[in-house]
Image (spheres, rainbow, N blue to C red):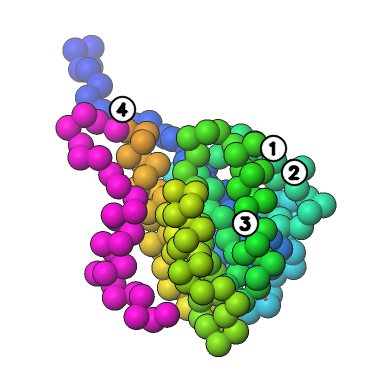
Amino acid sequence: MFRDKKPNCVFVCVFLQTILVGDSGVGKTSLLVQFDQGKFIPGSFSATVGIGFTVSFLFQIWDTAGQERFRSVTHAYYRDAHALLLLYDITNKASFDNIRAWLTEIHEYAQSNVVIMLLGNKADMSGDRAIRRDEGERLAREYSVPFMETSAKTGVNVDLAFTAVAKELKHRAIQHPSEPTFQIHEYIEAQKEKSGCCSYF
Ligand SMILES: Nc1nc2c(ncn2[C@@H]2O[C@H](COP(=O)(O)OP(=O)(O)OP(=O)(O)O)[C@@H](O)[C@H]2O)c(=O)[nH]1
């Protein structure tokens, strides 16, 4: 009965792997929990051991340990990563200074076309700020990566960070000649303007 019926729809599942990296305590687990569950649980996480992960639809996000002793575990995951969210804590200068070392490591172990985004987390703690926003912007420009400040506590820019990366990955995966080129920097700036996010800082 169905002999002449041809399939007219094919579902392709592509896992877009995104990894959160950065020094211990910058807020990787908190950012992931805020994105995944929309909540912040203060001081509730023990340091991530090796790798944790969550799957949001087909967007698979890996949370890594920031501690040096788990670094070799993390390296193994870089190779398969499509995107890396690299975090520092705006109240912790050392975590910002270490970003260059993280980028060196990423360039050593990850694929050359990996999408990288720099995030200055804990933006709600502006009273304790050690790194100005323009310092983050300057570093991001130097490495030609998109940048924004986030707060896993208030949720500011958390969805935007993950959505921008997901859109960039989707665009790369199914790029069609008729589709206008997706520009991640432009998308982020347009969304920031729409939400009026940045007056917050
Ligand atoms: N105020 C504030 N605190 C935050 C924020 N993000 C994380 N924290 C706090 O910072 C501490 C460390 O957060 P984690 O999410 O465990 O940090 P991590 O980067 O996953 O740490 P490791 O697993 O050791 O690599 C916790 O006490 C969090 O509650 C934020 O945006 N604002």
Which span of residues is magenta-colored?
175-201
Residue 52: x percent and y percent?
66, 53
Q: CA distance from mark 1 to mark 2?
A: 6 Å
Answer with mark 2 or mark 3, whichever residue precedes in sequence. Answer: 2
- Residue beneath disc 2: 73
- Labels 2, 3: front one: 3
Local crowd size for mark 3, using a 10 Å CA cut-off: few (<14), some (14–19), many (≥20) = some
Horizontal side, residue 67 vs residue 119: left or right: right
Q: How many marks?
A: 4
Element carrying mark 3: helix
Residue 56 appears in the rendering: no
- Labels 3, 1: front one: 3
- Labels 1, 4: front one: 1
Element carrying mark 1: helix
Q: CA distance from mark 3 to mark 1?
A: 19 Å
User: Which quadrant of the structure image shows residue 158?
Assistant: bottom left
The answer to which of 165 and 147 lies nearer the viewer is 147
Amino acid marked by disc 2: Val
- Is the C-beta separation of discs 3 and 4 under 8 Å? no
Residue 181: x percent and y percent?
25, 40
Residue 156: x percent and y percent?
43, 73
Answer with mark 3 or mark 1, whichever residue precedes in sequence. Answer: 1
- Residue beneath disc 4: 10
Of all residues, the one furthest to the right in this rendering is: 69
The answer to which of 171 and 96 lies nearer the viewer is 96
Amino acid marked by disc 1: Ala
107 in relation to 88, above or below: above
- Residue beneath disc 1: 76
Q: CA distance from mark 3 to mark 4?
A: 42 Å
- Give the numbered dot on residue 99: 3
Question: Which quarter shows the N terminus?
Answer: top left
